[in-house]
Image (cartoon, coloured by chain):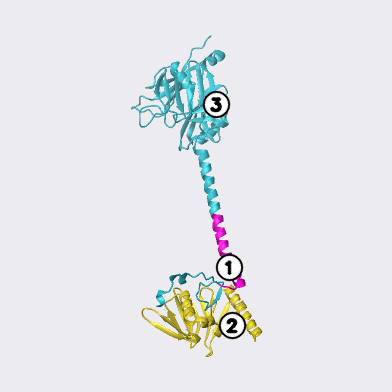
Amino acid sequence: MNRQMNKDITQDAMSDNEIRVLGGGGPFEEDTNPAHRHKLFRNFDKKKMVIFALIVLIFIILVLLVCLVFSQRATTSSQPVADSIDSVVVYSEKNVVETKTVEPGLAIQDTIINDIPLQIFTPMGCQLSLHLGEMPQDTNIMLLVQAADIRMDKDLPVGAFVYNGELISKGHSKYGFCAIIGDDITLGRQLETVLLERAIENNGSFFRQYSLVSGGQLISIPPKGKSQRKALCYRQGELQVVITQDEESFHDFSQALVDLGVEEAISLVGGASLMQYKNADGETVLQGKFDKKRRRSENFLIWREVPTER
Amino acid sequence: MTNEIIISNATDLIRVSASDVLAIKAAGNYCVLFLSDGNEHLVTYQLGQVEQMLSQQLGSAAATFIRIGRGLIINQEYLFVINLPKQQLIVRSFGKVQQEFSPPKEALRELKQYIEKRIKNEQTNE
């Protein structure tokens, strides 16, 4: 008999601060005493309201934290897309040769920016070109660095690549670019650029890389760990190659370039990539890992000596 | 309505007079009946279920029992001491069997006010 009673009775809403006189027809009969009910209601709600308010407050704080984290990630992870020209630097090689009339050479400067040891290579009296294929062995090479990255799945350069007017590969996963068209060398950061078509039309060269600095501003790119970094830079009216001596992140490297006064910079193949230069004694120095199984899409920026006009 | 309380389950049955019950205290999912002769008896029902049994079986006579908070029902006929600072409630039978409990202070305060109001009403009605 007794087991058949309403199971709900075991869950009556009796508060620890209440009293109840039995005989009112059951535990769920409404308390008709307004004063008592008010007191009961007040006591019942006060505790639960405090708990509820705390829960709501914690929930709001958590939501705000999540929104804050996501907004910061959105800001830092996506590289700003340049629909228009962000910064395009035109650097004329011919002008340099004409105005400076310097002996071909290579200035090598060591410096430390933000505790990051850097080496700055400034070719002088040289002509820059992009080379595709096996590394040349010319004796007049002043400076040689690997330019565009090569895809792992295909033996092709990453992003759009034009070599002597021939379109080798397409794509603009990286917004930085370098175009060599005639005597004009252009560094920039642009999603779509007419210079790609001009390179094709004018037997020029073009490749893409990460933009690190544009208009003197740091360009944030997704972190990819630490490695030796190299960059092609436009700084104080000169084209330079800046490399790190130690393994650094892209962000720290880019910040160092900004603090160095670089106006425009794109990355070059880093890590153990090949680099060759002539030192002050005229000796050829080769750095990097020389892989016998070299891929046909290997490409290099090469500065060759140009005889001075006397 | 009789003055007896019958609590039965599948295996046993308890029959006791309402006037023999000093208090009923919750013990987890069960209750302990404290009787006026000093005996205690465990019943396999929750306090809320026992409260309903009392109300159904005793009718208006169930008003002698007061539920205090979630864990205690006392027979106010045997209420002896309410001590708020000590948070102490003592019920005592005519045979001087005494049981002491510690209900929540706020409920104890409510009980004290109820008893005082009841006495005042009774005096007014006389």
Residue B108 sits above or below residue A165 on the image: below
Residue position marked by numbered label 1 in the rendering: A41
In which quadrant of the rendered view does residue A158 lie? top left
In which quadrant of the rendered view does residue A202 lie? top left
| Res. A168 visible in picture | yes
Q: Position of residue A11 (x, y in %)?
A: 47, 69
Discs 1/2, front: 1
Disc 1 from disc 3: Cα separation: 69 Å
Secondary structure mostly taken by the magenta-highlighted segment of the chain: helix
- Label 2–label 3 contact, CB within 8 A: no
Q: Residues within 10 Å of mark 1 (few under 14, many from 20)?
A: some
The residue type indicated by label 3 comes to Ser
* In the image, residue A35 lies in the stretch drawn in magenta: yes
Determine if marks 1 and 2 fall on one subunit: no
| Res. A121 visible in picture | no
Determine if marks 1 and 3 fall on one subunit: yes
State the mark number for residue B81: 2
Residue range (magenta) = A31-58
Q: Where is residue B38 in the image (x, y as percent from the top left)?
A: 48, 87
Element type where label 3 sits in the image: strand
Disc 2 from disc 3: Cα separation: 89 Å
Chain under disc 3: A
Q: From the viewer's side, name the closer residue of A203 and B117.
A: B117
Residue position marked by numbered label 3 in the rendering: A87
